[in-house]
Structures are given as structure tokens and as C-alpha cells.
Image (cartoon, rainbow, N blue to C red):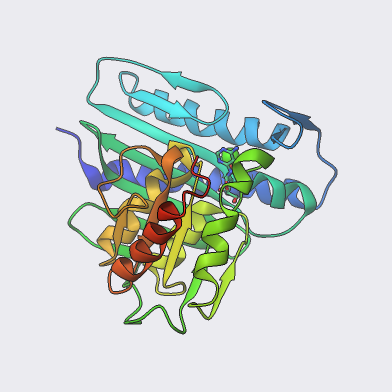
Amino acid sequence: MLDYTEALELAVSLSRQAGRLLKQGLRIEKQVTTKLHQHDFVTEFDIAAEKLIIDGIRAAFPGHAILSEEQGSYATTSPYRWIIDPLDGTSNFICGYPHFAVSIALEVNQKIEISSIYDPTRDELFTAITQKGAMLNGEVIRVSQQSVLDGSLIETGFSSRLSLAAANYPYFKAVLPYAQTIRNCGSAALALAYVAAGRLNAAWYLSLAPWDIAAGTLLVEEAGGRVSDLDGKPLIDAERGVLATNQSIHCEMVNIFKNIRCKNVGRV
Ligand code: 2AM
Ligand code: CA
């Protein structure tokens, strides 16, 4: 039986090492290459940070499965699977915009049990273990107490693929009149961590990948929030949309999203 505290310590240590590496790359010119399409970027720092993390996990737990953004899937028969985004917020990183994170989650029998999201520029470490609460730099965090959408600070983001980004326009337009305002800061992992810490009241995204949200979902739930798909149903596939809130404004957001679908406007 795996000791979750020890596994989290490993995730934190690797996140900090990867974060140090990313910080060194922030203000220098990077080698930027494209992946699936013209705005889907990767740098040598994404790759190096990912290698550092995967090497560390393989050394400690050689039998565990791994899913990571750049190297893809390393499948085994183990019930343990690490889900890694070595650099969430690559577009920010390329431009020197200091808002990005290292995200590591451990799934056990397909359920996230351990999370670590590390923001190296602010030296902020968000961690969670299932049923043990969520923390920021070792202090317990809770979601906000905001009870209505009116006055809420919300975040969303747009896929780097334009056709998928456009699917979010009607959602953005529908939420904006009800909220205080909507941010688009470029890291889904940090947006979820901020919902957990009560800095944002909600965040929603369409078209994400599992590594963008794996760690963040447990953080939000352990901080007293709620995570679902855009219909308010259990989240199965990040690609079809994710909604994370402080719980109190969840139904209001889902109701707004429902109206969009009635008008039959773009879904992914
Ligand atoms: P990344 O930086 O790791 O690619 C920006 O709104 C957020 O969406 C970031 O978390 C970014 O993750 C993610 N993102 C942007 N384009 C994406 C895509 N095509 N597929 C999945 N995630 C994407
Ligand atoms: Ca990434």
C-alpha cells in the first residue's frame, strides 16, 4: 500500500526542481516549436521539466503508469497513474509572462488521490491529499464564501486551436453580464488552484486535456468546492468542458450554460 504523504513529498520535490528549471528559462530566449497546429507550442523547457519529473517518478515507482503532456502515455497494469503537466501556461512562459505552473497528480484506480500545483514565480505550492484537505504553502485553504454569481470573479480560457476557442465565445458572453468580471490568465491549473484558495469564485474551460486539470480538481474538492462537467454532471472528459466553483454558485453557472445549449450554440 502506497504511503500518500511520501508520494506527495516526491511530487512536491519534483515540482520544485522543475519549477526552478522553468524559472531559469523565463527571461531568456527559448526554442519554440509547434506540435499539432500553428499555435500549439512547446519549448525545450517543457521537455526538460517533464523529463526531470518522469525520471524521478520512474526511479521511485518503476511500476507506476504515467500520462504526461509531451511524452504521452506510459501504460502499465498498476492501479497507480501519475498525470503530469510539466508546464501549464506554455504561451505565458514563452512571452515571459510570469503565470504558469507545474502540475502533478496521482490517480489510484482512476480516482485522483494526490495533487501538487507549483507556481515557481510566486513560490506558491498548492497541495491536496484526498480527505485530508487542501493547502497553500502548508496552510489550509478553503473556497470563497461568495453566495451568488453577481459580484463573482470568474476565470476561463481559450484553446490554442481557434475553432475550439470559438466554441467558448457564447459561454463567455452569457456569463459576463452576471459576474464581476472574467479573467483569462492562461493557466487552467492555476485557475483551479485559485478557486480552491478562494481567490476566484469559479472557473470553466472547454477543450482541455486531462493533465491540465487532474491536480486542480482534487484541490477544489478538498477545499470545499465542486467540480463537474458543464451540465453539472460528474466530470468524465475534460475535453467536453469542466466547471469548478466554490459550490454555492455552481447551480447558477450550470443554469446559464443550459440556456446556451437551448439556443444550440457551439459545443466542442
Ligand atoms: P498548456 O499551457 O499546458 O497548453 C489556457 O487557457 C489553458 O488551456 C492552459 O492551461 C493551457 O495548457 C490549456 N490549453 C490551451 N490550448 C489547449 C489545447 N489545445 N488543448 C488542451 N489544453 C489547452
Ligand atoms: Ca503544458
Q: Is residue 130 above or below residue 105?
A: below
Count of numbered labels shown in the rendering = 0
Pick the quarter of the image with the N terminus. Answer: top left
In this view of the protein, can residue 200 be seen by the observer?
A: yes
Can you tell which quarter of the image residue 197 is in? bottom left
Q: Could you tell me residue 31's position as x and y percent?
A: 81, 33
Q: Quadrant of residue 57?
A: top left
- In front of the other: 135 or 196: 196
Q: Residue furthest left?
A: 1
Q: Quadrant of residue 63?
A: top left
On the rendered structure, is 145 left or right of 162? left
Q: Which residue shows up at 41% across the image and 73% down it?
A: 201
- What residue sits 35% from the left and 77% below the top? 144
Front-lying residue, 136 or 251? 251
Q: Is residue 156 visible?
A: no
> In this view, which residue lies farthest toward the right?
29
Location of ligand 2 given as a quarter of the image: top right
Q: Is residue 173 above or below residue 33?
A: below
Position of residue 60 relative to residue 17, above or below, is above
Residue 119 drawn at (x, y percent)? 55, 57
Tell me: residue 212, above or below residue 174: above
- Location of residue 77 in the rendering, given as x and y in whole percent from the top left corner: 25, 15
Residue 90 point in image, percent of width and height:
66, 44
Question: Which residue is painted at 26% across and 60% down in the image?
Answer: 222
Identity of the residue drawn at 50% across and 39% down: 268
